[in-house]
Image (cartoon, rainbow, N blue to C red):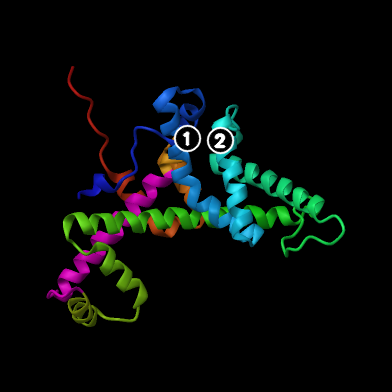
Amino acid sequence: MDQDDLRLSRIDTLWSVVRKAHDGAGQSLAAAQQRLIEVYGGAIRRYLLGALRDEDAAQEVFQEFALNLVRGVFQRADPRQGRFRNLVKTALFHLIVDHQRRQRRRYQEKPLQSETPDVHDQPAVLADQDEAFTRSWRNQLLAHCWEALADSERTTGKPYHAVLRFRLDHPEMRSPDLAAALSAELGKPLTAGAVRVLIHRAREMFADRLLDAVMGSLEEPSLDEAEQELMELGLLDYCRTALMRRREAPAAKPLAG
């Protein structure tokens, strides 16, 4: 699999998918809605589980979110309102508040049986909720990148995922020791030089996949906008070299007509 195979499709930004999820029809509409769930689903589930501390409650609120998406909750969403992930976070915040109100009514005669703070009555919690969803979205992006490396490894047979994962788990190891350990783990001989090349290639692929994922979430996916988003997510260090490579790359020449 080459570098482009690891990249998020440039055909549709997430904002264009949002529009199709509300203005499309038939299979196009359903596919766009499913795409949004696939992209944000992991982040949403982790966020809800952290906020509600109850798997059943988190699943219930997740299903409400999915149903609201089908019903057109983001129909009037506008890129000028900010990042789409912020709109998702706000929608989830209100769903959590509604869930807590239902729970409160259900247990009117005793305190809510949960350690979850009352986000409606405690404005200070808003900052924590914002940070929690940002962290969840960040973890989702990183998880997708690891999945991309694993997919590439299965397709090409080149151990990008295994080598990079081992490198991160053993940062103190020198290249010869890494080569020996990985040769034993993978069941095939690897030289120190080969390991260095694999690690370098895997890091490039990871960074490109992450940069494309972030750019795909923007309405106008410029490198400057992507850099700002990476800074907000605490992911810039992963992509500095990828940003530099793309800024230095010559612009594509238009096709002769």
Residue beneath the point at 44% across and 53% down? 141
Q: Which residue matches tag 2?
A: 69
**Tag 1: amino acid:** Gln
Residue 207's place in the image compared with 22, above or below, is below
List x then y, in percent, for residue 157: 17, 60
Type of amino acid under label 2: Leu
Closer to the camera in the image, 184 or 110: 110
Quarter of the image with the C terminus is: top left
Q: Is residue 198 left or right of residue 110?
A: left
63 or 244, which lies in front? 63
Give neighbour class at mark 2: few <14, some 14-19, many 20+ (Cα, 10 Å): many
Q: Residue furthest right?
A: 109
Count of numbered tags: 2
Tag 2–tag 1 contact (CB < 8 Å) = yes
Q: Which mark is residue 33?
A: 1
Q: Is residue 26 magenta?
A: no
Residue 149 at what x, y percent from top left?
29, 57
What kind of element bears circle 2? helix
Q: Main secondary structure of the magenta part?
A: helix
Disc 1 is placed on an element classified as helix
Sequence-first disc among 2 and 1: 1
| Picture coordinates of residue 251, whole percent (x, y) | 27, 35
Residue at 49% x, 55% y: name it.
138
For the point 54% across and 57% down, the residue is 46
For residue 100, side relative to residue 9 (left or right): right
Magenta residues, start to end: 186-214
Relative to 234, is 248 on the left or the right? left
